[in-house]
Every structure is written in C-alpha cells, then in structure tokens.
Amino acid sequence: MTDPDPTSGEPEHVAEPDIAMWGGPGSGKTAFLAALSIALLKARSTGWKLIGENAVSRTELIKLRRTLLQERTFPVPTEALTRYTWLIIGPPEARRRWWPWKARRGKAPKIKLDFLDVRGDLYAEPESNIDKKTLVDSLVRSRGLIYMFDPDKESRVGGAFRHLDAALQEIAGQLLTGDEYPDGKLPHYIAVCITKYDDPNVLGRAVNGGFTERHPGDALRIPHVPEERVRDFFRLLCREAWDYNAEMILDLIEANFHADRIRYFVTSAVGMYIDERGRFDPDDFLNVIHNPNGKLTIRGDIRPINVMEPVLWLGRMLRPGTMRSG
Ligand SMILES: Nc1nc2c(ncn2[C@@H]2O[C@H](COP(=O)(O)OP(=O)(O)OP(=O)(O)O)[C@@H](O)[C@H]2O)c(=O)[nH]1
Ligand SMILES: [Mg+2]
C-alpha cells in the first residue's frame, strides 16, 4: 500500500537563507568560518554537518579546516573577495503521526549559507568598487546577518562604529527609502558575535564584570556568559572601547533592527586551552601563543565556542514561512 503521507509527493524543498557576514578588518570573520566546520564536526552527535555546495567551496572548506587543524594557525588576512557556498545538513526530524507505530523519519533540514568573505576595511571605503558593490548587494539581499565585533581590537584601536555605520547606511539607503518596510526597520535577523572570548582581555572583562557563571553541563568548567547577560556584556565592551563613538554601536543596531530579531553571542574560533587534567585553568587558558617566528600558533585542542550556534539560530529563523517583511 502506498504511504498516505500528504507531503511525500512534494518536490524536495531546500530552505535557502542567504546569510551574509560582516565586521571590521581583523575582527575574526575568516577564523569564524574556518571554525564553523570544526565545530560541526565536533558536534557530530547532534547530527549536523557542513558540506561545500560546489567544487570551489569544497576546496576552500578543506583549506580553512587544514589551516586550523594541521597548520595550527589562523588564516591569512583576506585579500580577494571569496564566496563560500556551504550547506549545513541536519538530522532528519522524526515525524510523529497520529498513530505512534507510524512514526517515521522526515527529511533532513538543509540550511544554505552563502558567505561572502571580504577584507573588513572594504565597508568603510568611500569610493565604490566592484567588491564593495557585491558586498553591499549581499547584505541587502540576505535576510540573516552575522556581525563580528572584536572587543580586544576595540579596546586598543577602535573603528567598529565607523564600519558598522558605513554598512548600515548602505543597506538602509537601499531598503528603507521605499514603502516596503514602513516601520523603518531592516527586515534582517542579526547575530551579533563578540569574537575572541578566549583572549584574556575579553574573558578577563567578562569574569571581572561579574558576567560569567559555571554552565551546569560543562565538565571543562569554562566561565560562561548566560544568554540573558550577553547584551549587557556587549554594552560594557562598547562603553570601554578606545573610540568614544563605540558607545553608540548597540543603539545603532537596535535602532535599525527589530528587537526580537537581534541575538547576541559570545564566541571564540579556537576556544580555551584545556590541560591534560581536562579542566579550565584560570591561570593557564591561553590557546593562542606566539611562536619563535613571531607568528601565532594554536596551542591545544580547538574547541570553538558559540560558532555553530549563531548560524543554526539564523537558519532556524529564516525557514520559509517565518520571514515577514516589516
Ligand atoms: N585569540 C583569538 N584570536 C583570534 C580568534 N579569531 C581570530 N583571531 C585573531 O584575529 C586575527 C584576524 O582574524 P581573521 O579571521 O583573519 O579576521 P578577518 O575579520 O577575516 O580579517 P580581514 O580578512 O583582514 O578583514 C587572526 O589572525 C588571529 O590572530 C579567536 O577566536 N581567538
Ligand atoms: Mg578575513
């Protein structure tokens, strides 16, 4: 007898969110992408995996992964615009029917990632060029944004406000001048990622500011910033930035996006160093060290923190049917 499942005859439908990523130069964009595949590999018990959709994307994926895992260092600063078309495939959801004995496996969810990786200073360039145009197009077309904020750099050099402001001006200029979004907010979901949490300058401020606690499920005992405190931590990092203008970053984000479409994450591409006793040691957690050649080496195991989470959150939010304009 044929299966009466009403969806069984439907053509394969792949959710195709277009997630774009942006952040200032050196904020950790490429390292985040490199860590994404490792994070998914490590979390394979959850059933999610990452694949390159075409030959170029597959080659780039392997290259990025090799840099972190085998060469144990960071990717070089991005020069040329690189496009990664990746697919995250999840575990098939079990479909519950009215009759439990008819429970059966559903289709595997697929999230399409179309990441444009560009050098971070491109956003703030006053003149138009082909890379900048491609980038702005991608921000405008996408409905999921990953915004990278590097608190370490902000505390020393600054520049994040200028980059954010320049990019938002471009997107708002294209989307908000017509009548499509009458409430004056951009339609995107945005994952605001505080990068380099493993850096003592970042972790130290989280711990000293009282933002951390022990996650009950974490045997490694890495100080963890609970979800409901990340926004306040982000606000503090903006306030303590070298550039006074950084204080306006949070307001700028909240003025441009719907409050329920913004989520803040504390992330690290490489995570903390964990010694052979298998515990986080507050006196010895640096996982990035300078080698004798003056370059950076990743010291121990790579344990990305909150790298797949923002991507999976955006993927979930962007499923067809959940996107509404305005
Ligand atoms: N400690 C630590 N350092 C990081 C992390 N991610 C990136 N970095 C450092 O930041 C540097 C820049 O990271 P990238 O990923 O190249 O940054 P980007 O945003 O792609 O930079 P551009 O391509 O130049 O715009 C790296 O070379 C590392 O030194 C991290 O998770 N932890
Ligand atoms: Mg880069």
Image (cartoon, helix red, strand yellow):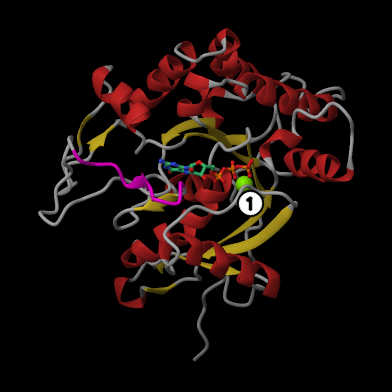
In this figure, what is the number of numbered marks?
1
Residue drawn at 70 percent across, 28 percent down: 186
Residue 120 picture location, percent across and down: 67, 37
Place residue 230 in its image quadrant. Answer: top left
Q: Which residues are magenta?
A: 284-294
Prevailing secondary structure of the magenta residues: loop
Residue drawn at 30 percent across, 77 percent down: 101
Magenta segment: does it hold 230?
no
Residue 58 picture location, percent across and down: 61, 71
* Nearer the observer, 227 or 281: 281
Residue furthest out toward the left = 277
Place residue 323 in its image quadrant. Answer: top right
Q: Amino acid at mark 1?
A: Pro
Give the SS element for disc 1. loop
Residue drawn at 45 percent across, 64 percent down: 71
Residue drawn at 84 percent across, 30 percent down: 174
204 vs 130, left or right, is left
* Nearer the observer, 283 or 176: 283
Q: Which residue is mark 1?
A: 320
Q: Is residue 287 above or below residue 161?
A: below
Question: Can the viewer see residue 62 in this picture?
Answer: yes
